[in-house]
Image: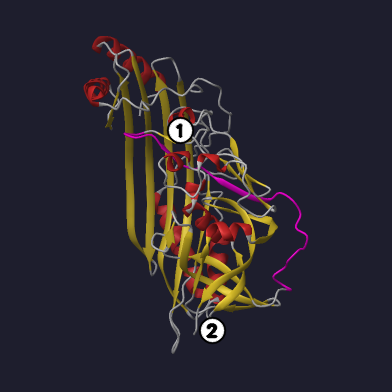
Amino acid sequence: MPKVQEIAQSAAAIARELGIDKYDIYGSSVDDTSVEVFQGEPKQVQASNRSSVIVRVWNKNNQVGVTSTTDVDPTGLKLALKTASEASFFGVKDNVPDFSPQAKAPTVSIPQETPDQAPVSDLIEKLIDAEKTVIDAHPAIESVPYNGLGQQDGNRFYLNSEGAMREEVRAYTSIYLYTKTEQEGKKPRSSGAFKISHSLQDLDIDGCIKEAVSKTISHLDYKPIKTGKYRVVFSPRAFLSLFGRFSNLFNAQSILDKQSLSTPESIGSQIAAPYLCVDDNALHPENISAETFDGEGTPTRKITLISQGILKNFLHSTITAKRMNTEPTGHGSIGAKVGVSSHFYHVYACENSTQTYRLEEAENVVLIDNLQALHAGVNSLQGSFSLPFDGWLVNKGKYTSIDSATVAGDFLTLLKSIIFVESEAEVTPGGICPRIWVEELSITGEQ
């Protein structure tokens, strides 16, 4: 993809030719390579180069037209600008998008690591070695049916007719390993692990192998659990996956659309236990895919969502910020309709609990490692959830894998029932989070 300066110069010349005074352009491109293996042989190799460009044009009546393209050479830009200009006469007249007031404000400077991609042969070799190591680790591990090692380079830009111009590049490499066991007289058990880094050289493949193996082995000697109320500990990944399904709590667009558990008046209300703090921070040092600006060119920054259990902020685009008389927060995603989306959650303890809890000492506590069926088992508008899970019943340091079971509850009640937020955090693809202890939730297992 051409440099943003070249695109800006072409766009300005074409806009003058077409009589267009106001426009902006957001674009991104991704160069992606990934491999999968099965039983020591390559199963699938994929390589792709994808690009997407969104062009918006405002007419004299301040209506906006939007179009998309994959071509940013002069011919493609001219067609996109002309099409968006024509579409603007059919644009909305209420709550019309506008340039971000922060589109030319400075962004945080972060290192942009773009190492050369490793050869596909190296990816295949390392993944075959990882698969073999996992299978050889225990006789019950029959295969690693779901696996992948991939690397991705990407760049994105934003510019507008008032001189705003931003561009950034990023690269990362990731691996996942998901096992399957076979034991006579027992159900197949599965578990997995995921790691991500800026480059193949820095990727913790050994850590991924060890985590996948240890979790798989820990689920072999499973037992049913009796239905009832249990104290529950969420792993970092499990808590963040559930938290993300109820992101409408903080999404200003969802709130304005009345598709949220919050209302505009919810700011300042106590929605969680006083031990819980949550930020949305695209610039967190542990965020491999950090972004310094959003789809509207607004700089990203740390936004405190929950502090000492109190709801502090919503996530805004320029449109929602204007409608709610505040500032955009760097969470706008440009398109035919400007949306709002989160970046990278940071969950931590903001004050000391009156009591410290440890799994080594706990009795009959359910540790939930992974939640399943999040697409079907969550009602984000009612706040309820009922989800199958993988986990263990922990009794004074002894871990017993739980056979088929579900956890159910109300999310807002869960937040207020948090009794302890551990200090040691884990980095996951969706954020950084420690284990979260909840006083009581309903577990459905053996009747």
Q: Secondary structure at mark 2?
A: loop
Nearest the eye: 188 or 340: 340
Q: Are marks 2 and 1 in contact (CB under 8 Å)?
A: no
Residue 237 visible in rendering: no
Give the left or right position of residue 100, taking residue 346 as reference. Answer: left
The reply to whether the magenta stretch includes residue 243 is no
Residue at 51 percent across and 36 percent down: it is 291
Label 2 – label 1 distance at C-alpha:
50 Å
Furthest residue to the front?
265
Q: Secondary structure at mark 1?
A: helix
Residue type, mark 1 in image = Thr
Residue 396 image position (x, y, % from top left): 71, 77
Colour scheme of the picture = secondary structure
Residue 291 versus residue 35 in the image, above or below: above
Nearest the eye: 271 or 128: 271
Residue 289 image position (x, y, % from top left): 51, 42
Picture quadrant where residue 97 is located: top left
Residue at 52 percent across and 50 percent down: it is 430
Q: Main secondary structure of the magenta part?
A: loop
Residue 229 visible in rendering: yes
Crowding around mark 2 (Cα neighbors within 10 Å: few <14, some 14 to 19, many 20+) is some
Residue 83 versus residue 52 in the image, above or below: above
Residue 397 image position (x, y, % from top left): 69, 76
Reading the image, the residue beneath label 1 is 320
Chain-order first, disc 2 or disc 1: 2
Residue 209 image position (x, y, % from top left): 53, 64
Picture quadrant where residue 32 is located: top left
Give the left or right position of residue 239, taking residue 49 as reference. Answer: right
User: Magenta segment, which residues?
Assistant: 335-361
Reading the image, the residue beneath label 2 is 223
Residue type, mark 2 in image = Lys
